Amino acid sequence: PGKGWNRADAKEVAGWKTGRAGFGSLRRVQTPWRTSNIWMRREYVMPAGTDAAALSLEICHNEDVEVYINGAQAVRASGYVTDYKVYPISDSAKKTLKPGKNVIAVHCSQTAGGQFIDVGLTTKKPPPEPARKPRRPAPKPVIKTPYARKATWAKTMLAIRKATAGQPEMDYG
């Protein structure tokens, strides 16, 4: 498509083909999609009084997907998911949601294997981001020697071998 295909006021999309969601070559397909890219648009009429802050996007995508709401990027995800996943809508896209007509525009690309794309608004909450485990500090060397802190294990072992050459072997038993 031309530049601006994702904007609510895009004119060149008037001649686009239509089909029922989901699009692809895998299960749940209503409309076949067998090219490497697909661009889709759908109008959504938001009722007055709807809390835009409570909305999320529920997407099943195989493979990379970009979703826009009224021209603002709402979600970008790489790879694929095997089932529907709830994604938070970006703050910039939520600000564009208004009572009345809104446009959801989607681009999905596929590089290998089966393909599928389906997108919808939902009031389901995205799962919380997993807590990141704090990194443990690197262990301190057991002994302080010139060979105790080399860049790699192999360099450390070579330094130990050189430093201990000619010394009697130690009994660890």
Image: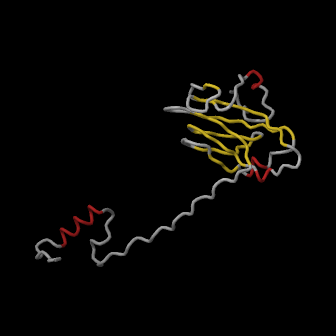
Residue 124's spot in the image, x, y percent?
71, 51
Residue 165's spot in the image, x, y percent?
14, 71
Rendering quarter of residue 44: top right
Q: How many marks?
A: 0
Q: Is residue 146 left or right of residue 64?
A: left
Q: Residue furthest front?
A: 28
**Image quadrant where one finds the N terminus:** top right
Residue 151's spot in the image, x, y percent?
33, 63
Residue 51's spot in the image, x, y percent?
82, 52
Question: Is 5 drawn above or below residue 165 in the view shown?
Answer: above
Q: Residue furthest right?
A: 48
Q: Is residue 162 left or right of residue 125?
A: left
Rendering quarter of residue 80: top right
Q: Is residue 35 left or right of residue 18?
A: left
Q: Nearer the viewer, residue 155 or 128?
A: 128
The residue located at (27%, 71%) in the rendering is 147
- The image's colouring method is secondary structure
Question: Is 18 drawn above or below residue 106 in the view shown?
Answer: above
Q: Nearer the viewer, residue 16 or 169?
A: 16
**Image quadrant where one finds the C terminus:** bottom left
Q: Nearer the viewer, residue 107 or 129?
A: 129
